[in-house]
Image (cartoon, rainbow, N blue to C red):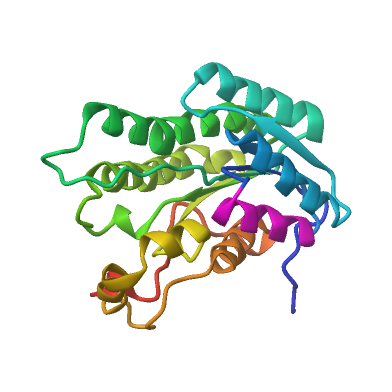
């Protein structure tokens, strides 16, 4: 009855793959046997990450692209299928955040946040989803946030975008289940990427930690483990759900 988690033979696309959570997801997927198309706007860091992962013996392709451009999104879908042969898994991880009180947030900050975190995620899911519909199978994993379900000060656009991600996840799961496509989301708390460590140090971090029952922030690998489960055959009966990787922050 026991079955180990595996992505052997899977072909996966990971956005925001150059650093942080995306890099951890891509690295773990490679360790589990997946070939990869890595997407990021940061060409230099993306190349470095791809070279590291190639050292694990997997096929890895780099696609430098801007998720605010529909033309780039179509290119990501086209090149991913061309390079990998097919796409079994899409991980929508790319995201941005501009921290500002609601009365000071600018139109530019709002538009950029929604363009990357929600619009880009949706249209890339649509583009690759058409391929998955044609082959009658696929797994889509969206990286949301605890900010999708609770309010965080200074995060109005980010909260709105991530709440949208959860809603899109549910609708795509509903519509595409008949094609054997699973669509799920992961909602992390603060994750200790280099950026996370810098942003949540000192008193600000201490106050956030007081709200987490497990008493610590998450690690990038913990999001990667959850993403791998949702991308694997072990999650075949799970769709339309959001898994909280938040140490209990949102149970209060």
- The number of callouts visible is 0
Residue furthest toward the bottom? Answer: 214
162 relative to 249, above or below: above
Looking at the rendered image, the quarter that the N terminus falls into is bottom right
Given residues 25 and 23, the one toward you in this image is 23
Q: Residue at x 27, y 43 (%)?
A: 160
Magenta stretch encompasses residue 24 = yes
Magenta: main secondary structure = helix
> Where does the C terminus fall, quadrant-wise?
bottom left
**How far across and down, in percent of the image, does residue 222 sit?**
55, 69
Along the viewing direction, whichever of 161 and 47 lies nearer the viewer: 47
Q: Residue at x 10, y 40 (%)?
A: 103
Q: Quick check: 133 left or right of 122?
A: right
Q: Please tell me whether residue 207 belongs to the stretch shown in magenta.
A: no
Residue 137 in sight from this viewpoint: no
Q: Residue furthest left?
A: 103
Left or right of residue 126, residue 209 in this image: left
Is residue 202 positioned above or below 48 on the image?
Answer: below
> Does 39 appear above or below 4?
above
Q: Can I make out residue 234 in this image?
A: yes
Location of residue 96 in the rendering, given as x and y in whole percent from the top left corner: 41, 42
Residue 42 placed where, x, y %? 60, 36
Q: Which residues are magenta?
A: 19-31
Q: Residue at x 47, y 70 (%)?
A: 218
Front residue of this view, candidates 208 and 117 = 208
Query: Hey, which quadrant is residue 4 in on the image?
Result: bottom right
Residue, far top: 71
| In-front residue for pair 179/219 | 219
Q: Residue at x 42, y 61 (%)?
A: 198
Tell whether 59 sits left or right of 171: right
Q: Position of residue 148 (x, y in %)?
A: 31, 53
């Amino acid at each position: 009855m026991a079955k180990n988690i595996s992505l052997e033979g899977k072909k996966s696309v990971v956005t925001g793959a150059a650093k942080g959570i995306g890099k951890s997801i891509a690295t773990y997927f490679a360790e589990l046997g997946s070939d990869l198309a890595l997407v990021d706007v940061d060409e230099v860091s993306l190349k470095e990450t791809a070279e590291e992962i190639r050292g694990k013996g997997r096929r890895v392709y780099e696609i430098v692209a801007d998720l605010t451009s529909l033309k780039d999104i179509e290119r990501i879908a086209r090149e991913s299928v061309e390079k990998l042969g097919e796409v079994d898994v899409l991980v929508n991880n790319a995201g941005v955040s501009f921290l500002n009180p609601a009365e000071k947030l600018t139109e530019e900050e709002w538009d950029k946040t929604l363009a990357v975190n929600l619009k880009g995620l949706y249209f890339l899911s649509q583009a690759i989803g058409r391929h998955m519909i044609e082959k009658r199978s696929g797994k889509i994993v969206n990286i949301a946030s605890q900010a999708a379900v609770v309010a965080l000060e200074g995060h109005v656009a980010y909260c709105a975008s991530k709440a949208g991600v959860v809603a899109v996840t549910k609708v795509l799961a509903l519509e595409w289940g008949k094609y054997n496509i699973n669509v799920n989301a992961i909602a992390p708390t603060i994750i200790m990427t280099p950026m996370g460590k810098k942003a949540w140090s000192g008193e600000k971090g201490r106050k956030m930690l007081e709200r987490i029952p497990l008493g610590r922030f998450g690690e990038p690998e913990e999001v990667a483990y959850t993403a791998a489960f949702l991308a694997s055959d072990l999650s075949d009966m799970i769709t339309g759900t959001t898994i909280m990787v938040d140490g209990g922050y949102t149970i209060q």
